[in-house]
Amino acid sequence: MAVEDLWRLFDIIGTLAFAVSGALVGISRRMDIFGISVLALATAVGGGMVRDVLVGITPPMALRDTTNFLLSVGVALATSFLYQWTALHRMRRQRLLTIFNVSDTIGLAAFTITGALTGVRVGGDDSYVLPILLAATTAVGGGMIRDVLAQRMPVVLYAEVYAAASLVGAFVFCALRFTLGVEADSWLAFLLVLMIRFAAIHWNWSLYHPRPPKRHRDGEMEE
Amino acid sequence: MAVEDLWRLFDIIGTLAFAVSGALVGISRRMDIFGISVLALATAVGGGMVRDVLVGITPPMALRDTTNFLLSVGVALATSFLYQWTALHRMRRQRLLTIFNVSDTIGLAAFTITGALTGVRVGGDDSYVLPILLAATTAVGGGMIRDVLAQRMPVVLYAEVYAAASLVGAFVFCALRFTLGVEADSWLAFLLVLMIRFAAIHWNWSLYHPRPPKRHRDGEMEE
Amino acid sequence: MAVEDLWRLFDIIGTLAFAVSGALVGISRRMDIFGISVLALATAVGGGMVRDVLVGITPPMALRDTTNFLLSVGVALATSFLYQWTALHRMRRQRLLTIFNVSDTIGLAAFTITGALTGVRVGGDDSYVLPILLAATTAVGGGMIRDVLAQRMPVVLYAEVYAAASLVGAFVFCALRFTLGVEADSWLAFLLVLMIRFAAIHWNWSLYHPRPPKRHRDGEMEE
């Protein structure tokens, strides 16, 4: 598979997955069908627009081509109707959270790959730094935009091993790309990000929290 | 009127209108005169800076020219003083909300036109996709920045037919530009966005909300 | 000292200072060590990435070089451990707020200088507008990203003389650069921003607030 097709494949996987995650957040915020579509769209194309602007690809792909736009809005409509017309809205909170986590994680992994591939194209074949940092920025960007717009604490700030999963995947991608070839390497890194993040969710990896004193509560540093 | 002058005219209309909307949000958040100015400025020039960066016009117009900077700060000061010294602060909540909606809608319509004109200039005379998507991004960008900074739910996510009004206006602009000429076409699209959005506010167009179950409340999907 | 070295020096000062401020906000939000690192990183490199993208330096420095990335994560880890293992977490709220204000102000002043130096390089030796506006955008950008991600009201919107301190510093930098030479001028402007902001904090400069009526409470303009 040509690198362009591979890039496009992961771009579509990430767009679909992030659109689902954005639509679910919109539904949980009781938005109407337009709000849900805008949030799905911002989540799905936001990270990629940031990626393109950061490396000077202007106008970004998402503004030159309606595919991702239509895909995102289609996913938003489909998710909304499925939510009401099927058993989805009778699911327990935990199940909905699982669907959200799965779609968010697939988006994270897929955009890690598109970011790394773009970084290699812009930075040159032997570059490490740009592909890894661009991969992580692209991967966490869409979810960050979704959460900031929907006034939630961004997943990347509270989730177990989120940006770190993307960084590890991008590093492995860069380290093995000449050994495995770009195609096999992309799939390996994609699966690795998925596995790390799912493991972190499943075993609820508990990380070091600097212990705040009892009286030091949320937001108390505000003036 | 030359296209440059037309662009500049709508840029100034949008800047003034969005500055008013930003200043009103700042006042309603009890900010001081500096905070109100910064919020008015971010609202008024934010969308245009995003537009310019997206199509590779760097540095963006707003950083090369102090006109919009001074206009925004002037509007912020004037709005603040009018608020206190006139009957404005004795108005009922509903009236203030109306002033906010009018200024926000004029900004939306005016930046739809500057975005579409910029998209045509960058994308070529026969382009449709870039002008329409850039118009909507420019138009909703300023309000999004305003609302995210002021910690409000962004208007674009809850308002009736907001981004959609901009998309329709931009589509009509693109479809009729060769028939009507750019100047008449710009004014037609501007008025169309205004009318669609005001109609949506006035008749409180009720859109499809996927019905969430009772126990599925705001934010409950947070981990 | 060459202008490049001077730029780099202020870039490192600002990165370290903003990383401390981001880490403190993360700790006060009870984030784990990954969340704290991401927030410190976004604060420390965010403003500079916005600056580079605005003037068309793509990919931005922060994605081409791991120094600032590693510095920010190192500062986040060090701040977290110091917080727990030393007397830091037993400090009174007021003391922690002071450390936050000092680091945030040093970051503001240092990024004012890197923004102004970049503006002069891009805009030409006799430019005023671009260096001043770019300086203020760079200086307030990192803190804005930090506060939006952490769901706090951005400092720039409520603080006494924050963006204004940066604008004054940048103006003095531009006015005196041929008289004093770039190096002395940079340090003078840096100290000036520090002094203005610290004076505003210390004497709690009370600015004009348009007085909202009693019944006009926070957020009541929401629909």
Image: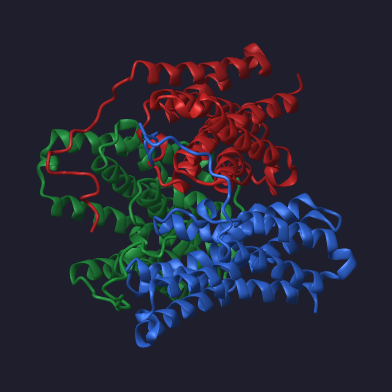
Chain colours: A red, B blue, C green
Q: Residue A3: image x %, image y %? A: 73, 24
Q: Is residue A116 above or below residue B77?
A: above
Viewport quadrant of the C terminus of chain C: bottom left
What residue sits 77% from the left and 50% below the top? B129
Snapshot quadrant of residue B121: bottom right
Snapshot quadrant of residue A69: top right
Q: Residue C165: image x %, image y %? A: 35, 69
What residue sits 47% from the left and 22% below the top? A168
In the image: residue A5, left or right of residue C14: right
Q: Quick one: A118 or B49, which is closer to the camera?
A: B49
In the image: residue C177, left or right of residue B34: right
What residue sits 62% from the left and 59% below the top? B138
Q: Quick one: C57 or C175, which is closer to the camera?
A: C57
Residue B206 in view: yes
In this view, the residue farthest toward the right is B179
Q: Quick one: C116 or B171, which is closer to the camera?
A: B171
Residue C116 in view: no
Q: Is residue B157 above or below residue C36?
A: below
Number of residue marks: 0
Q: Residue A21: image x %, image y %? A: 52, 33
Q: Residue C84: image x %, image y %? A: 16, 34
In the image: residue A136, left or right of residue B61: left
Q: Is residue A93 above or below residue A72?
A: above
Q: Is residue B73 above or below residue B222?
A: below
Viewport quadrant of the N terminus of chain C: bottom left
In the image: residue A180, left or right of residue A217: right
What residue sits 32% from the left and 37% below the top? C36
Q: Quick one: A201 or C145, which is closer to the camera?
A: A201
